Amino acid sequence: MAASRIAIVTGAGTGIGRSASLALGRAGWSVALAGRRPEPLQAVVAEGTALGATMIAVPTDVAEPASVAALFAAVKARFGRLDLLFNNAGIGGRAVPLEDMAVEDWRRVVDINLNGMFYCTQQAFRLMKDQDPRGGRIINNGSISAHAPRPNAAPYTATKHAISGLTKATALDGRKYDIACGQIDIGNAATPMTQRMGSGMPQADGSVRPEPTMNVDHVGDAIVQMANLSPDANVLTMTIMATKMPYVGRG
């Protein structure tokens, strides 16, 4: 694979974003890491550099359109093009009953999980359709919650369902620009955000039970598999999950 292929990963400082960034770096991609906190981004850059990868950190708040525009401008200035956007940045929000949800909490989740993904997708379109060779690939982090909710998680569930629609619209509207778009739905990858799964998670029947997790590096490998497809092929949806998590069937 040519080392000149360029990727942006949002939410790249920890968890899934970190794993995807390092996996892409190992596979020969140059990676721009975006996230709100500079320190974790720089730590991943150091890890990637030690592996021989080319990485840069671009502190970014995906909920702010101007910040997103600055990210893509920085990538264009440094690399001249963009071949892959992994739309990964997201937050879970507080687990509270729907009727007690503060409007500010709802808006914060929507601003980051949905609006931020749209802002990044829009900027990617503008760059990818005008570069030579034209086109590229966008991968959206949908989550298992794009299919089935957890209790007391209305904002997160709503945004992840919306991402499924955005993925399909992006795949359709990107055809004329040679832009492919797919979605990866991830279930119970072991990250700092999922540590509490070992002690118990609320279930739909009202019980609280521990849930199995999987190594997050499997997600990074899956991202590379999707990213390395030739331009005439696309994984529209992929579900990667801990084998024994309570999702399929009745748990």
Image (cartoon, helix red, strand yellow):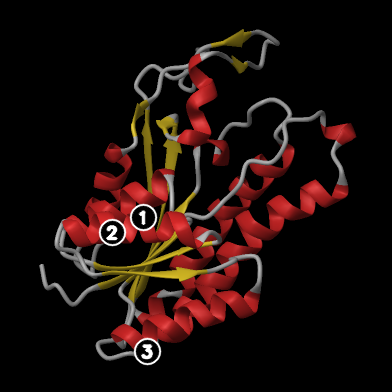
- Residue wearing tag 3: 77
Question: Is residue 243 shown above or below 233?
Answer: above
Q: Is residue 165 left or right of residue 141?
A: right
Give the label on residue 46, or none.
2
Q: Estimate the x, y position of residue 182 in percent, counting from the top left.
A: 39, 57
Give the residue drawn at x 22%, y 52%: 225
Q: Estimate the x, y position of residue 44 in percent, counting from the top left.
A: 34, 55
Is disc 2 in contact with disc 1, using a CB cutoff of under 8 Å? Answer: yes
* Of the pair 52 and 69, the residue shown nearer to us: 52
Q: Is residue 236 left or right of residue 205?
A: left
Q: Is residue 122 left or right of residue 1?
A: right
Give the residue drawn at x 26%, y 60%: 227
Is disc 1 in contact with disc 3, using a CB cutoff of under 8 Å? Answer: no
Q: Amino acid at mark 1?
A: Ala
Q: Residues within 10 Å of mark 2 (few under 14, many from 20)?
A: some
Question: Is residue 217 shown above or below 250?
Answer: below
Q: Residues within 10 Å of mark 1 (few under 14, many from 20)?
A: some
Question: Is residue 197 shown above or below 108?
Answer: above
- Residue wearing tag 1: 43
Does residue 190 appear anywhere in the picture?
A: yes
Q: CA distance from mark 2 to mark 1?
A: 5 Å
Element marked by disc 3: helix
Upstream in sequence: badge 2 or badge 3:
2
